[in-house]
Image: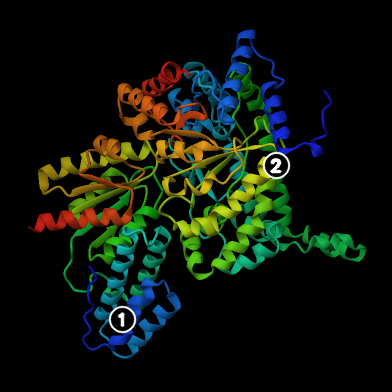
Amino acid sequence: MVVTPNLRGCPVDRVEALTEAIVEMDEVLALRLVGELVDAGASRSAVLQAANAALQTVGERYEREEYFLSALIVGGELFKKVVEMLGPETRGNASGAIQGKILLGTVEGDLHDIGKNMAATTLSGLGFEVRDIGVDVPSAQFVEEVREYEPDILGLSGILIPIAATAMRKTVEAVRADRAEGGKSPFVIIGGRVDQVIADYVRSDSWTTDAMEGARICQRFMEAKRA
Amino acid sequence: MTVLPWEDMSADQRRAKRLEDWRNAEVAFESPEAEANYRMRVDRLIAAATLGRPDRVPVVLSVGFWPTQLAGITPYESMRDFVRAAQAWLDFAEEFQPDSMSGARAYLMPASMFEELDYRLFSWPGHGTRKEVGFQYNEKEWMPAEDYDALIDDPTGYLLRTYLPRTVGAFAGFSRLSSFLDLTTLGSVPDHMAGWASKEMIETLKALGEAAREVEEWTRVVTPVVTRIQAAGFPPFRGGMTVAPFDILGDTLRGVRGLATDMFRRPEKVLAACERLVPLAIDWATKSPVPPAAPFIFIPLHKGADGFMSEEHFKTIYWPTLRKVIVGLIEQGLIPLLFAEGRYDSRLEIIQDVPKGATIWRFDQTDLSLAKSTIGKVACISGNMPVSLLHAASPAEVADYTRKMIDAAGEGGGYILDLGASLDDGRPENLKAMVETAREYGVY
């Protein structure tokens, strides 16, 4: 599904051109169009919505295997540049409605972050509020962050088996034990070098090896939660 | 029989010679039984590697820090207490009786050498990673996009004077060096040598000297213990390494994000750089300072995996220069041992375009049946026990999976059982189940 940008107060052709420029990975044109749109008085949220629409299209092309990881990375980087150009006030979701809150981090002992960062960008593009707490995160810190941020979803990333699997399991146990006393436990999804065997071991609710697929799982979880 | 000089031999003759040398390696075996086991294992591996049918499916254990972890030695200690760590590798071989395994030296490297070098590309146990965790690459755009032309014009000069001072601190002094052509004309020699008198270069020479001394001492201590693994009847497998030109760019020069961007913004530079790196990649494996202990050249494959790039990009950007490296190594009688990390299902048809019986393809998450019916027709295939099973499943599940792999890939030979990816720790009973299943179920 491609979201039609909110076109109020924008030169329509340039908004569409911006979406297309991002989809086609034309960074120079895309950033020029953002500048022109801002100068022409386009609402910042409309610009961001156009970028969101582009990222969704990139994601769909990825799912149809018309685009590959390299395009997902480049599209994500471009999306981030657009957000940076627009400044801090438009960070977050363009339409104002947050799809859900997700806490992301790479577990203790593991420093890999490419997959996690892609997941963060993809989820932001789909309207999630993402708190990324970095790499080599101890389970106790995840517990603290879950308490404070109260995410709908907890995303644990890791590549190093068995170090990451052991740390994921420890984190899931600690978060659930803590939440059992204080509040609702988030939906847990693991990503990286994982499979069903690791997911069973970790006792996560879901697993993925793909940032886009992971984002879809999160979307479906939120839809089910809202229903 | 007259022996042809090396220069006059064909690729097949050179390969045969290297395999024969490997089989007849001058080793002071610890017993006649060890010697017989060594040759039996080499014959088994040669048969599989050259698409023949051995007595049974050979088993190679490409593990990481597992042997030392099993002995209660952390990766941190492995890089400092070499003799104890090397002994753990010998014990591991004796315990699991593989036909070959990872080279112990790669997991016993001296931390002090890396410290002297101020090596920044990787973190190691106790230096950027925790003591109980292995190596991790420091992902970064070490080479900015503006440097493409410098790399393409003169790769070695670029590495020496720009890239190494950035990535290996001890090389800082080289950034000030003028052209080596200075040394070809009498009058320019003093100017050139002035570059060697800079404060940075004095520091560089001191640090490199220290690092060299560290590695010399390490070699003196480690070699006798590592040699005992061979003397006990376990042949070495990897005789050197190189990297696909696209991965040289993507892994440690431009980084994932940099290279992904380049494929859209400056594909012509990516192609030109890959072409330029072909002879260097071949040279990397063939000009090793130590003669190869085995004729297999390890080539880890990264950015060509399913999903990272389109089939079109794989065909036009990734594969052509990798193929040139493969062919270049085969010309020298070497057997490229390509390790396709991740999934390679959509690449299997394309990679079939290699000389028959002269490569080994180890797979990680690729479908082995699919591999057998494609690349398996022209090359030995290897893999791919999931590390998740070795870590978290039961021995019965591992045995069951091993039988499935042998059913999928073993028919007619040309298959070596191995792990899908390197593993630093796991359940030893699971590894034993894998090896024993191959020994019983893998008999031809």
The answer to whether residue A2 is above or below residue B305 is below
- Residue B211: in sight, yes or no? no
Residue position for label 1? A16
Q: Chain of mark 1?
A: A
Which residue is at the front of the view, B376 or B362? B376
- Name the residue nearer the viewer: B121 or B272: B272
Q: Quadrant of residue A4?
A: bottom left
Q: Nearer the viewer, residue B236 or A168?
A: B236
Q: Residue furthest left?
A: A227
- Mark 1 surroundings: few (<14), some (14-19) or many (≥20) residues within 10 A: some
Seen as rendered, the residue at the extreme top is B32
The residue beneath circle 2 is B331
| Mark 1 element type | helix
Position of residue A132 in the picture relative to residue A225 (left or right): right
Type of residue at label 2?
Answer: Glu
The percent coordinates of residue B95 (x first, y second) are 47, 16
- Residue furthest to the right in view is B186
Chain containing the residue with disc 2: B
Q: Amino acid at mark 1?
A: Glu
